[in-house]
Amino acid sequence: MPSDSEKPISKIYPVTSTDSLKPGQMSCFDVNHQRIILARIENNYFAFDEMCSHEEAELWKGALREDHIECPLHGSRFCLRTGKPVEEPATVPISTYPVTIKDGKIFIELVDG
Ligand code: FES
């Protein structure tokens, strides 16, 4: 079990306001030098990597399908809750990030370093 000094440190970053995205929309943000996509499905918000894990494709150019993002290049679909690919050719998950909402603002948690 890692000691407290070995645990990764995460930080919470403000990103935008809840009314900046309509249901079914997504947008890409620079958060602590990382490109993160924030997507809204109904009243749920999901944060995940900008780039597909298969090749060099920007996922914000793809399509939201229920709680999945479909890559614009070869059509892999990733679960927005887990980042796992549910359709090939991608086999490696994308990273997803915890999202919290407080007072109409959206925050994303990233591991520092
Ligand atoms: S680059 Fe995304 S599925 Fe190939």
Image (cartoon, rainbow, N blue to C red):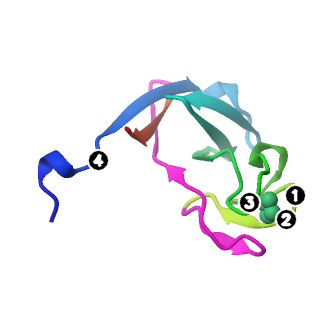
Q: Which residue is mark 1?
A: 73
Query: Disc 1 versus disc 2: distance between alpha carbons?
Result: 6 Å
Mark 4 / mark 1, whichever is N-terminal: 4
Q: Within 8 Å: ligand 1 and the Cβ of disc 1?
A: yes
Q: Residue furthest left?
A: 3
Label 2 CB-ligand 1 distance < 8 A: yes
Of pointers 1 and 3, the one earlier in the residue sequence? 3
Instruction: Tell me which label, 3 or 4, sits earlier in the chain.
Output: 4
User: What residue is pinned by disc 3?
Assistant: 66
First in sequence: mark 2 vs mark 4:
4
The crowding category of the residue bearing disc 3, from other C-alpha atoms within 10 Å (few below 14, some 14 to 19, many at least 20), is few
Q: Position of residue 106 (x, y in %)?
A: 51, 31
Residue under label 2: 75
Quadrant in the picture for the C terminus: top left
List x then y, in percent, for residue 88. 76, 75
Q: Is residue 93 above or below residue 28?
A: below
Q: Is residue 87 covered in magenta? A: yes
- Which secondary structure, mark 4? loop
Amino acid at circle 1 = Leu
What is the C-alpha distance between the residues marked 3 and 4? 32 Å
The magenta-colored residue range is 82-104
Q: Main secondary structure of the magenta part?
A: loop
Taking the image as shown, residue 95 lies to the left or right of residue 87, namely left
The amino acid marked with disc number 3 is Glu
- Residue lying at 39% horizontally and 33% vertically, measured from the top left: 12
* Pair 2/3: label in front: 2
